[in-house]
Amino acid sequence: QTVVTQEPSFSVSPGGTVTLTCGLNSGSVSTGYYPSWYQQTPGQPPRTLIYSTNTRSSGVPARFSGSIRGGRAVLTITGAQAVDECDYYCVLYIGSGVWMFGGGTKVTVL
Amino acid sequence: EVQLLESGGGLVQPGGSLRLSCAASGFTFYSNVMTWVRQAPGKGLEWVAAISGSGVTTYYSHSVKGRFTISRDNSRNTLYVQMNGLRAEDTAVYYCAKPSGSYFSDAIHMWGRGTMVAVSS
C-alpha cells in the first residue's frame, strides 16, 4: 500500500528557514508525481501554495518554494513569519487518476 | 474569479445516503477535471474521487469505491457526489476542488469552502 510521508511537526524561529519533505514509502519522488503543497489554517479550506513541483500559485509570497531533493519533494519557507504557523500538506499523483495526500506537518513558529 | 460552492451536507444515519453538489463558476467547467477531497475532524486531507471534463471517466479512492459515485452536469456547471452506504468514518468536511488543468495529473489548484457530512445514529 502506497503511503505518502511527511514530518508530523516542525518548529522554527521567526526569520528562520522551514524545510518540509514529502516522501513515498515505495521509493523516490520525481517530477512525474507532480508534487504539490497546500497550507491550511484551522477552520479554513486549504490554500494552494505550490503545484507541479515548483510552480507557485498566484498570490503566494516568494518565500515559499518547491523542489525535489534526495528523492523527496521539498517545501521551503525562507524567512518564516508568525503567519506561517499552520498545517502543511503535500499530495502526489500516484497514477491512474489517483492522488494521495501526506498526513500533514504542523509548523510552529516560536 | 473561480468560485466553487458546495451544498448538501448534513447529518445522516449509518447506512444512509446523501448527495453533495458543487456549483462552479468563473471558468470553463466542461473542460476541467473536477475532484472531491474530504477531511475528517482533526485529521488530514484525503483525496476521494475525480471525474473527467466529459464525465465519462471517473476514479475513486479505495475507501469509497463502490459506495460513492461522482458525476457532473456540464449544462448546469455542477459537480456531484452520491454517497451511499455511509459509515461513521465518512464523517468529514467535503471539499469540491478544481485542478490547474484538464488532465487527471493536474494538481488541485482551487478549493471550495466545504460542506460538512456527519454520519451518526
Image: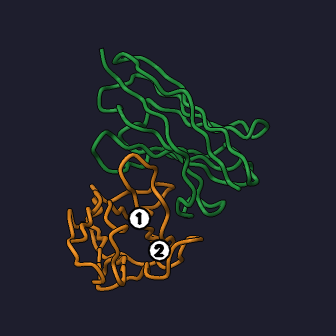
Classify the position of the C terminus of chain A by image quarter.
Answer: bottom left
Q: Can you say which quadrant of the picture contains the N terminus of chain A?
A: bottom left
B98 on left or right of B32: left
Q: Is mark 1 on a helix, strand or loop?
A: strand
**Residue at (44%, 29%) from the top-left corner?**
B67
Output the letter for the chain in green: B
Residue A92 numbered mark, or none: 1
Q: In this view, does B116 lie above or below A73?
A: above
Tell me the residue at 38%/82% (across/down): A68
Give the numbered dot on residue A32: 2
Q: Is residue A56 left or right of residue A67?
A: right
Q: Which of B3 and B63 is in front in this view?
A: B3
* Coordinates of residue B30 in the picture (x, y in percent): 74, 49
Subunit bearing disc 1: A
Residue A85 position in % (x across, y down)? 31, 65
- Residue B49: percent from left, percent from top: 49, 44
- 10 Å crowding of disc 2: few (<14), some (14-19), many (20+): few
Colour assignment, chain A? orange
Give the farthest residue toward the right: B75
Name the amino acid, label 2.
Gly
In this view, the mark in front (1 or 2): 1
Question: What scheme was used to colour the molecule?
Answer: by chain
Q: In which quarter of the image is residue A14?
A: bottom left
* Alpha carbon distance from label 1 to label 2: 9 Å
Q: In this view, does B7 lie above or below A67?
A: above
Whichever of callouts 1 and 2 sits on the residue coming sooner in the sequence is: 2
Q: Which of A64 and B74 is in front in this view?
A: A64
